Image: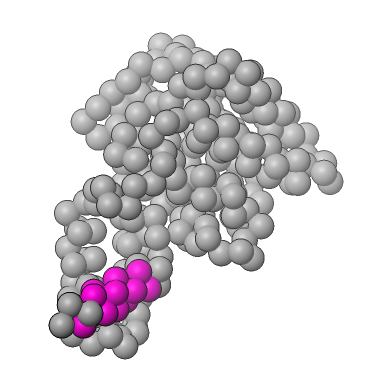
Amino acid sequence: MKELNIDQTLNLVSCEARELEQSSRYGGLFGIAFVTEGEGVLSCDDDSWHYEEQAIFLLSPGHPIHFKSFYRTNLLTIFFDPFRIAGAADPLNSFTGMFRAVRDLFSVPSFLRPKELRNETDRLAVTHLVRLIETELGHLQDSSRELVANSAALLVNLVKRNLPDTQRTETGTQYSEETDRVLSQVRKMLEQTDHLTIQEIAAAMNMSQYNLNKLVIKGTGETLKAIISRFRAELTSNKLAATADH
């Protein structure tokens, strides 16, 4: 297993599929995996798909994957800090564009299905970028980190632009039952007291701030702070509309 961590933000891992499946090190991170060699069947939740070389699939916390390889399968996987994904709108984030694209990739209901790039030029570009990253991981040099980070950003954006269903649709977003329950509680609390802090909300829900924020990020792709700001804006807008009606 070859690994490279960049600024506590990106983790790049080149390994056999069975190594990744057996490792718990990256279980809490979102990732994009590129099959560099091999063929087999990938299972996740109650679904399974055939894969072969050049297949691309997404990895998400809470959705463990299992490989049944017909031939030895090797992967290059890019793992992303979930808190950076949720803060993709932060102008101080040097990876803003990439993390915004990652957030969009994980925002569609079918994100677990293996991806296939429609554009031949993009497929070739992805193949060469993956090989470049693997070469750098095998022989790290002073320039490797910047080269690998830039290559990873290109890979993410190439994957995103080939998938027509990655445009975020706020009104049609489908969340899990647990996420909906938590968001509903947050909204009700804000309706009763507008100036609640995250600490007060977490205490009322008998959760730590960290666990509450982590749950919201995993469920929505946004931080709790962003969710609260949006809810407050909606509540203010509704109050103004009601006042105007009278």
Secondary structure mostly taken by the magenta-highlighted segment of the chain: helix
Q: Nearer the viewer, residue 128 or 74?
A: 128
Q: Nearer the viewer, residue 170 or 128?
A: 170
- The quarter of the displayed image where residue 7 is located: bottom right
At 15% from the left and 82% from the top, the residue drawn is 246
Q: Is residue 17 magenta?
A: no
Left or right: where 143 falls relative to 68: right
The quadrant of the image that shows the N terminus is top right
Q: Position of residue 192 (x, y in %)?
A: 18, 85
Left or right: where 42 falls relative to 80: left
Q: Position of residue 114 (x, y in %)?
A: 39, 26
At 39% from the left and 55% from the top, the residue drawn is 221
Q: Nearer the viewer, residue 67 or 107?
A: 107
Segment colored magenta: 229-243
Left or right: where 189 falls relative to 85: left
At 58% from the left and 20% from the top, the residue drawn is 123
Q: Is residue 231 magenta?
A: yes
At 57% from the left and 32% from the top, the residue drawn is 158
Residue that extends furthest to the right in the rendered view of this protein: 142
Q: Position of residue 109 (x, y in %)?
A: 29, 39
Question: What is the image's colouring?
Answer: one colour
- The quarter of the displayed image where residue 91 is located: bottom right
